[in-house]
Amino acid sequence: MDASSSIRWALYYVALSAVAALVGGGLVAGGVVLGLGTAYAQLTGGAAVGSVLGTAAPGLAVAALGALVWVVGTVAAAVKVLTEAVDEQMRERFDSEKVKSEILSVLDDRLSEVEHDASETRRKVSELKREDVANEFEFGEN
């Protein structure tokens, strides 16, 4: 793979990962705003731990979802970029028309060899027949 393709795929990965990070980070921030900030204020105010956890639960769930979106999004970006880069490289390296042409060239060479061998065999068989006929003629006169 040439340098420009590598840079292009790297930038594509960075862009996809940035989208995953922004969406995941937004969900984490939303979780903080939704419940963690209020729960922290309750905890510092001396509220019971059970009520603080009840207040924080929705925010924790949204924050955990945000972290999951970030991790899964980053891995999905890596898989997508890697798969597409390999597919592109394979298409460039293994052009089907080129492969067909090379196969046909080899087959043509083999066919020419077989035709040559067949003509040589025919020629030798003809020589043997002529020798047999000549031998029969010589023995037939005596």
Image (spheres, grey):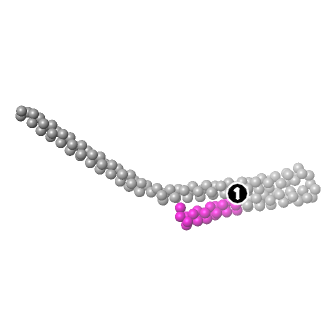
Q: Residue at x 58, y 65 (%)?
A: 7
* 137 with respect to 108 (left or right): left
Which SS class for mark 1? helix
As drawn, the residue found furthest toward the bottom would be: 4
Where 96 sits versus 12, above or below? above
- Where in the figure is residue 38, as x and y percent of width and height? 85, 59
The amino acid marked with disc number 1 is Trp
* 37 with respect to 10 (left or right): right
> Residue 6: which quarter of the image?
bottom right
* 100 with respect to 123 (left or right): right
Q: Residue at x 55, y 58 (%)?
A: 85
In magenta, the rendered stretch is 1-22
- Where in the figure is residue 49, as x and y percent of width and height? 89, 51
Considering the whole magenta stretch, tell me its main secondary structure: helix
Q: Residue at x 29, y 50 (%)?
A: 112
* 123 with respect to 95 (left or right): left
Q: Residue at x 68, y 54 (%)?
A: 72
Query: What residue is pinned by disc 1?
Result: 70
Where 64 sits versus 7, above or below? above
> Residue 43: which quarter of the image?
bottom right
In the image, 74 versus 138, the foreground residue is 138
